[in-house]
Image (cartoon, rainbow, N blue to C red):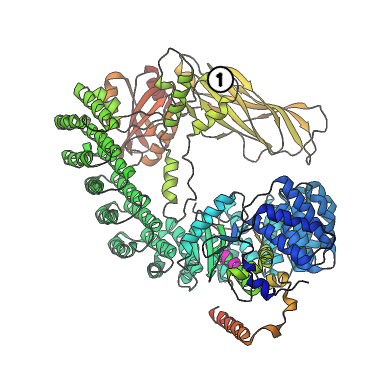
Amino acid sequence: MEGSLLEPTLNAIKGIAILDNDGNRILAKYYDKNVFPTAKEQKTFEKNLFNKTHRANAEIIMLDGLTCVYKSNVDLFFYVMGSSHENELILMSVLNCLYDSVSQILRKNMEKRVVLDSLDIVMLAMDEICDGGIIIDADSNSVVSRVALRNDDNPIGEHTVAQVFQSAKEQLKWSLLK
Amino acid sequence: MSSFKRDKKEEEDGVGNIFQNIEKTTVLQEARVFNETSVNPRKCTLILTKLLYLLNQGEALNVKEATDVFFAMTKLFQSKDVVLRRMVYLGIKELSSTADDVIIVTSSLTKDMTGKEDIYRAAAIRALCSITDATMLQAIERYMKQAIVDRNSAVSSAALVSSLHMTKMAPEVVKRWVNEAQEAINSDNVMVQYHALGLLYHIRKSDRLAVTKLIAKLTRTTLKSPYAVCMLIRIIAKLLEEEDSGNDFPYFDFIESCLRHKSEMVVYEAAHAIVNLKRTTSKELAPAVSVLQLFCGSPKATLRFAAVRTLNQVAISHPAAVTACNLDLENLITDSNRSIATLAITTLLKTGAESSVDRLMKQIASFVSEISDEFKVVVVQAIRALALKFPRKHNTLMNFLSAMLRDEGGLEYKASIADTIITIIEDNPEAKESGLAHLCEFIEDCEHVSLAVRILHLLGREGPKTKQPSRYIRFIYNRVILECPSIRAAAVSAMAQFGASCPDLLENIQVLLARCQMDSDDEVRDRATYYSSILSKNDKNLYNNFILDTLQVSIPGLERSLKEYTQNSTNQPFDIKSVPLQVGPSPDEREKKHKSEGMLTSQGPLRPPPVSREENFAEKLSAIPGIQQLGPIFKSSDVVELTESETEYFVRCIKHCFAHHVVLQFDCLNTLPDQLLEDVRVELEPSEGFELLSVIPCKQLHYNETNHTYAILKFPDDDLPSCVGTFGAVLKFIVKDCDPTTGIPDSEEGYNDEYILEDLEITLGDQIQRVSKVNWGAAWETAAESSVEKEDTYSLSSMNTLDEAVKNIVQFLGLQPAERTDKVPEGKSTHTLLLSGVFRGGIDILVRAKLALADGVTMQLTVRSPDDSIAELITSSVG
């Protein structure tokens, strides 16, 4: 297995999953027919993955021959899976895009309840990020601009002062972290 | 447009939970709303979301349900609501594989795809391509070409990605879009560039010249997209790997320059490629390693992980190059991400010098209790590698392992430690006594039955050969008193081994066995009685056959043979020789197993235990008339290629050897798209003595299809020397020209043609099955009385090292090396190789080869076999 060069292909993503804080699937997609072909195998894998990741916030893990990167917030767990040889940073960029897109769609209310309220938009966002294992877009702003079609009826005036302040703080934090 | 903010009232009712208790039937019922004349977008969106949610949860629709919903969904095209429309696209994609007649929406989607609304177009293209088949593709080809070069980047990306998906279905059509893809690669949008490069490469990947041109062009321009650069690096790396021409290939410099790229993703990709290229020299490796070293200190866990993992790979091939990073790696031992910490440790163990082993082990000891079992297993495997590398350190390592063995841990962890100790014992005679002592101590308090049984078995095998066999008896007999039946039974067998190998202990053993005959368990009593009665006979031969060397048959094979035997009521006694033999693991397999260790890749879900190749083939072959009568399959050879791999017809051969026959299985592949081959067969010119019984041709061979044709031959009777031979082979067939796209022949008339294949050899190795003898020495002694011995001396002038000679002999004879004599200790100029196996028909063969190194290798080969002519055959065919 060592000495393995990466096959030049666009199919970088084996799967994307959003789980809740009990490890149950909210949304999940697998893009390779050879990786967990049945729903049962997929769910076993997700349970396993959740058990290994929900306590330690360690960002990356190898499981069942896949490299999985993950991120969590309150009661949501975001995962992106790729082959064990895949460039981990590419997977991470997709995860960041997924996380940021959902965060923007939910206006930073990252909670399971809110995700379910906007499940249709989150589904569309996932579809815009990855199509059949190929990364379509890894820029959250552009993803959101293509799916958050309901923004129009919620002008800036409706944000509370606290919300605006919060988002400014977040942005500052991120720019410092980068 | 529906409102995003739901009413407060609805929220209080718990809208968030609408997905909790939904059922398929209810949702399908609700979906009937889609058929109403005026569409309520909000309601329909919700229902559609529920439906997609259900599908996503793994609920399956049958064809009728899927088709019904699909058709209802098409009604929703009349609504202008954007979200609803987009959800409909998603629905189309989800259902396209199950529902019938999905092409019904082609025109609606084509309209959206070419319409003015940008927000629809990209998604419509992707949905459209999921329902299009090869014939329909022609109709939308024009639109696809336009979309690829569209100014809107989302549309262009969607078209490129969809094209790539469709190459699986209609490669010829997509190939025609090369010019458009070429244009898209110059796009300003990063993703379009990436997708265009992916598509272009995919179309051209079989054409080396075109790929080289593509690379040449792209390395001169600067690609904006980091993803595209990563892709380009992979393409170049692949090309470099295939290129044999050596170092003058200019594109390596490009990869190296990417180490200074501003995106970390690209830098890592480049470093990874350099590390993994086989041709990379240690000098070229240095910049890549220093980049990875830098990453080790990154605050991002993923980056550290990637770096350590790659360094771990480097440590396997170029341990010296990684030593520079040792300090950084030591810092990572305390990393909060345990995967990183474990990788760091194992890397350090690989690079460490002999002097640093003690220090490292101390460090690990402080850390090992905190990590989970799986990581402990990885650490244990690294220790095993270390023990093989530095045999002199076995004391430190053994103490460490036994301390780990005493700690808490699951079965897998304990088993891997026991495995490691066993490997060390087998590999290093000096460590044997202390290792066995540790294991003895371990079984005193072992909660895992399977592990205790294995260790008892090992004690039975290795204990008698030590200086003081008697000391182990106490440990073993303690088990008989204290443990559960399966362990007691194993302990009884182990004691019997001592009795058989150590005459001075025999009396004591008999006393112990007599006590065991009073056991409460049937199996334990039976074994004790059985062994006790054999041991009382005092016959060396009996000992060897029934205590020291047990049955060599493959268990599934035995099961099947017995079942067949009981079904056919014959009066003949069951013949154990007719059962396929248990095959020892081939050296490749063992090597592979060791190599993959310590890489921290979990193996995925458990797979069923592998069946032997022979079992697999037996099932396939039994379906072919004329083969079943030949009896059980004795051995299947490795695959032999009879053509170059890139010719018009690609033929490979597997030789299946039976007791008196050989079946040649030819796997033929037709690589010409415009030809249909019929009545394909291989005509052989057998060497003298072989009798060609029948040929089973393959009726039809379509383009890109592999099919089999067989030839059944009978080995020469009573004339063993002519059982090895070389056959001329010609592939004969009827060609029918056909249409490359449909595969239907142009006319019924075909013409005969032939294709000369390389000669096929039936070797000695094909007719010998490897069988491992546990106690080779004893078998050899017994064979001295009952067998014929042949001896000859050869000079193998083409061999330069003992290692090489051993490998060649093992391969040529197809025998199993015994007692690990296939490993030549370093720095020795003489070596004795011990081999064992069985000739077809079930005749044992034992071979001892004494090798000496002096201007080539001189070999004295002694063969013992019950059959005179077989021993003769072996001595005469070597050389």
| In the depicted structure, whether residue B691 falls above or below residue B82 | above
- Residue B548, horizontal then vertical, whole percent: 28, 30
Q: Chain of mark 1?
A: B
Return the residue at label 1. Answer: B713
| In the depicted structure, whether residue B417 falls above or below residue B322 | above
> Which residue is at a point 35% across and 32% down the rendered structure image?
B835
Q: What stretch of residues is rendered in magenta? A: A91-96
Q: Tell me which corner region of the image, top left, top right, bottom left or bottom right, holds residue B213.
A: bottom right
Q: Nearer the viewer, residue B249 or B609?
A: B609
Q: Nearer the viewer, residue B93 or B50?
A: B50
> Which residue is at a point 59% across and 25% down the rendered structure image?
B623
Please state which amino acid type lies under the numbered disc 1.
Leu
- Residue B183, horizontal then vertical, whole percent: 77, 63
Q: Residue furthest top?
A: B571
Q: Nearer the viewer, residue B654 or B624?
A: B624
- Residue B403, horizontal then vertical, whole percent: 26, 56
Give the side of residue B382 with respect to residue A129, left or right.
left
Q: Tell me which corner region of the image, top left, top right, bottom left or bottom right, holds residue B78.
A: bottom right
In this rendering, does residue B697 appear at all? yes
- Residue B280, horizontal then vertical, whole percent: 51, 58
Give the side of residue B627 with respect to residue A151, left or right.
left
| In the depicted structure, whether residue A160 falls above or below residue B377 | below
- Quarter that holds the C terminus of chain A: bottom right
Q: Secondary structure at mark 1?
A: strand
Q: Main secondary structure of the magenta part?
A: helix
Mark 1 surroundings within 10 Å by alpha-carbon count, few (fewer than 14), some (14 through 19), many (20 or more): some
Q: Is residue B471 magenta?
A: no
Q: Nearer the viewer, residue A95 or B649?
A: A95
In this rendering, does residue B151 appear at all? no
Q: Disc count in the image? A: 1
